[in-house]
């Protein structure tokens, strides 16, 4: 059965058009797009406000949502924050992880996110013993996304060392398969679904020995799967890599065949000019996570230089200090303004592109992130009449979405033509705040 949506205003990259009809076929793809339709056709579902393609959250650690606010007490660094994070990771089981991720993904849907890239490394029981189903934790995440109504790319993560050859510590034992060969055997058991795609990740150059990087790169390359890696988030990682290998993490990855168009470096914060050239020249993407990078005092990455060199930009909410892709897009531009004391490094359209089409491409969903024939019918509608967004003329909708709106302004989310969020209410998870409170409370019990 074909479904028809009438969009009061729609961002058809790069312009905003009034009165747009989107026809959705039975397979959940856009069958037709018509502009200049002043009134809703009979039977059409009306989406008032500005509709953009569904948003792609290219970097998520779902369990970090349990840390929100609790890690703001006292001072410290990324490394002290990490100890608190480990204490949460220690308490998760497949059941509690499913409950938490389902609530977190529902929160993402309410924020207009229709696809998430889950950087997943909680593989085994806390002592490192595999579950009867060796992918029980990953399957919990895939099921959680389905129940929340969103798409997922499970970036199954290789993590076999605590730092340049050191054995995993007691917190990290559940992350490790022992070797990347064993990781590949387990990851191969995971299968794509209609709503889920399987990718790979290298946690970091400190967590995967140099002589095992090739295994992960080859696994992803053989499958044409996306490959992500935390890269140069901390200067301490760079210094340790220089001491161990006499090169930067980026050079190490380049020398072992990790860089390329299907690879995305997450953060890419502390880079040399040569690093930037290697990433851009190879077409390796960059996922910036500004709200986490500022929350953890990581620093401001060279996003402008990376994009100029040829590195596509995407956005992620990472630790979920907030879940708001409009804030991530806005923060990338505003961070750069603070750093350079000049304005206008990206247009609103370019920032929306990072949050939509380019984010989906980084996650292996090249058929999503655009409102056009043949694309997956994933849509996000932002109110233009809230206290944050009222005033500007509709043709400035892209600017309003990026520089004024927040996740609270999302009114609708459609995934594959199916209405998941309607008038600000999740259709599948009735009480998202209650689900979050219950899931996080269970971890504290």
Image: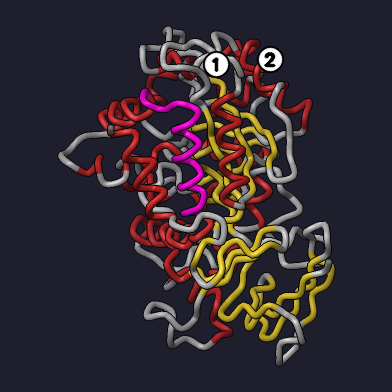
Residue extending farthest to the bottom is 38
Q: Reading the chain from its start, which is encountered first: label 2 or label 1?
A: 1
- Residue 198 lies, with reference to residue 20, above or below; the image says above
Which mark is nearer the camera, 2 or 1? Answer: 1
Instruction: Residue 147 in the image: state x and y as whole percent.
Output: 59, 47
Q: Residue at x 54, y 69 (%)?
A: 348
Q: Which residues are magenta?
A: 90-108
- Circle on res. 36: none
Residue 268 visible in image: no
Instruction: Residue 118 in the image: state x and y as whole percent.
Output: 55, 38
- Residue 396 lies, with reference to residue 215, above or below; the image says below
- Circle on res. 131: 1
The residue wearing badge 2 is: 185
- Residue 261 lies, with reference to residue 254, above or below; the image says below
Q: Residue at x 59, y 34 (%)?
A: 228
Nearer to us in this view, 26 or 11: 26
Number of residues whose C-alpha sits closer than 10 Å to that of mark 2, classed few (under 14), some (14–19) or many (20 or more): few
On screen, residue 141 versus residue 14, left or right, reads left
Q: Is residue 106 magenta?
A: yes
Instruction: Residue 73 in the image: state x and y as whole percent.
Output: 17, 41
Name the element at disc 2: helix
């Amino acid at each position: 059965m074909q479904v028809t949506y009438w969009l009061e205003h729609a961002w058809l990259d790069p312009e905003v058009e009034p009165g747009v009809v989107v026809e959705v076929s039975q397979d959940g793809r856009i069958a037709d797009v018509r502009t200049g339709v002043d009134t809703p056709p009979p039977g059409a579902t009306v989406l008032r406000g500005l509709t953009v393609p569904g948003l792609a959250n290219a970097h998520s650690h779902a369990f970090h949502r349990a840390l929100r606010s609790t890690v703001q007490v006292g001072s410290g660094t990324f490394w002290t924050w990490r100890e608190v994070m480990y204490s949460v990771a220690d308490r998760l089981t497949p059941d509690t992880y499913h409950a938490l991720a389902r609530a977190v993904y529902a929160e993402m849907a309410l924020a207009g996110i229709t696809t998430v890239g889950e950087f997943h490394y909680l593989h085994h029981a806390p002592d490192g013993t595999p579950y009867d189903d060796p992918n029980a934790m990953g399957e919990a995440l895939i099921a959680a996304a389905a129940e929340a109504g969103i798409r997922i790319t499970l970036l199954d993560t290789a993590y076999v060392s605590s730092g340049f050859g050191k054995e995993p510590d007691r917190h990290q034992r559940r992350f490790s398969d022992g070797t990347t060969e064993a990781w590949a055997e387990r990851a191969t058991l995971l299968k794509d679904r209609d709503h889920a795609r399987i990718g790979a990740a290298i946690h970091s150059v400190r967590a995967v020995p140099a002589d095992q990087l090739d295994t992960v790169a080859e696994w992803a390359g053989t499958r044409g799967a996306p490959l992500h890696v935390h890269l140069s988030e901390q200067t301490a990682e760079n210094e340790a890599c220089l001491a161990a290998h006499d090169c930067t993490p980026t050079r190490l990855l380049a020398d072992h065949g990790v860089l390329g168009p299907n690879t995305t470096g997450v953060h890419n914060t502390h880079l040399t000019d040569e690093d930037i050239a290697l990433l851009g020249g190879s077409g390796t993407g960059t996922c910036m996570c500004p709200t986490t990078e500022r929350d953890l005092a990581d620093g401001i990455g060279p996003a402008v230089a990376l994009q100029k060199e040829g590195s596509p930009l995407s956005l992620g909410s990472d630790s979920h200090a907030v879940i708001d892709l409009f804030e991530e897009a806005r923060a990338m531009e505003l961070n750069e303004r603070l750093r350079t004391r000049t304005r206008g490094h990206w247009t609103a359209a370019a920032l929306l592109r990072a949050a939509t089409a380019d984010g989906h491409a980084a996650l292996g969903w090249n058929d999503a992130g655009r409102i056009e024939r043949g694309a997956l019918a994933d849509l996000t509608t932002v109110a233009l009449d809230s206290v944050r967004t009222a005033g500007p003329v509709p043709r400035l909708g892209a600017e309003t979405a990026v520089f004024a709106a927040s996740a609270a302004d999302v009114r609708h989310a459609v995934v594959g033509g199916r209405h998941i969020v309607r008038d600000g209410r999740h259709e599948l998870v009735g009480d998202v705040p209650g689900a979050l409170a219950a899931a996080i409370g269970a971890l504290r019990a």
